[in-house]
Image (cartoon, rainbow, N blue to C red):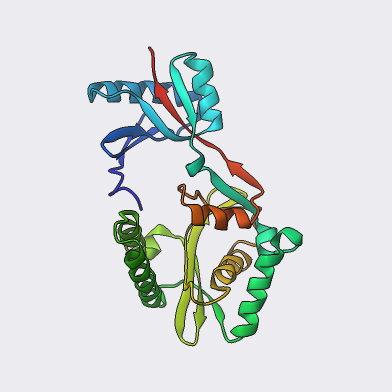
Amino acid sequence: MWRKPYHVQICEEDGVLCMTCEWDGVLQALQPVCPQEKWNEAVEKLRSYFGQQGKTLLFTGVEKNFVDFLAETYAGQFAFESDRDNYDYVYLADKLITLAGRKLHSKKNHLNAFRKLYPQAEYMQITPEILPDCRAELEKWYAAHIEAMPDSQFIPWERDAILELFEDWDYFQLKGGAICLDGRIIAFTFGEQLNSDSVVVHVEKADPNIRGAYPAINQGFVEHEWSGMTYINREEDMGEEGLRKAKESYKPEKMIEKYNAKLIAG
């Protein structure tokens, strides 16, 4: 989804998948994808590549276990910093379905209000047949947001990324859900299984003028598509105050910490 604005490059060699991205002219490496016993090999490949580019090796968005590996294997050679804006929010699936308990009482109220106001609303699984209606809702959402934030680069990038996924929906094998109200898609979301017990939700959009639309698609998607899973990873808040407040309000079970690591010696 983000390969164009972030200039993502990939290289697979000897069972090691290395990835780099670029932001504001700064070349960065992502956490390599390989068995843990090959991490050292991956770091050396990336260090060599960055050196060839005349750049200092910089990892972005890596997890705590990779930081621990770097600190132990390359003692004193990396400087680390926590990247709170990119922490992943992880929730228990059953709590997102039931919204039970005092901490989620306001969410349950919004969902109940939606159901009372719009009893005709229907949850639908995203299929190629309803993708045109999802596109229509997407365009309305972005038209409103780009008007409010005309200087935002992120908004058009995200729009293009979602449209690209819609164009090749079957290829990506994502699961998606939508809320249909009086013949119009008012909310949609999609994600995929991450591992044996976790799901990652990539995108969630809803008409902000319809009370409870966001809680309805959030709850409905997990209930209908992922009730057998344990965790729902709803990704990061990117440091946006409104998004952070919304994600914190669902009371995450845990946060997946992310770090940056810069080579300073060696």
Residue drawn at x 47%, y 47% is 239
Answer with the quarter of the image where residue 246 lies. bottom right
- x, y (%) of residue 67? 51, 26
What's the residue at 55%, 69% (across, down)? 217
Going by the image, does 86 lie left or right of 95?
left
The extreme left residue here reads: 53
Residue 124 visible in the displayed image: yes
Percent x, y of residue 144: 36, 70
Q: Nearer the viewer, residue 200 or 13?
A: 200
What is the residue that sits farthest to the right in this orientation?
101
Task: Give me the residue at 68% from left, 72% from top.
Answer: 109
Q: In which quarter of the image is residue 223?
A: bottom right
- How many marks the image carries: the answer is 0
**Residue 15 is at least partly visible in this image:** no
Vertically, is 228 above or below 78?
below
**In the image, 123: left or right of 17?**
right
Which corner quadrant holds the C terminus?
A: top left
For residue 238, side relative to residue 157 (left or right): right
Q: Which residue is drawn at 26% across and 36% down?
A: 25
> Residue 195, how many percent across, how many down?
56, 47
Check the image and report above or below for 233 versus 165: above
Horizontal and vertical percent for residue 137?
Answer: 40, 74
Kindly indicate the quadrant of the structure image that contains residue 260. top left
Is 62 on the left-hand or right-hand side of 163? right
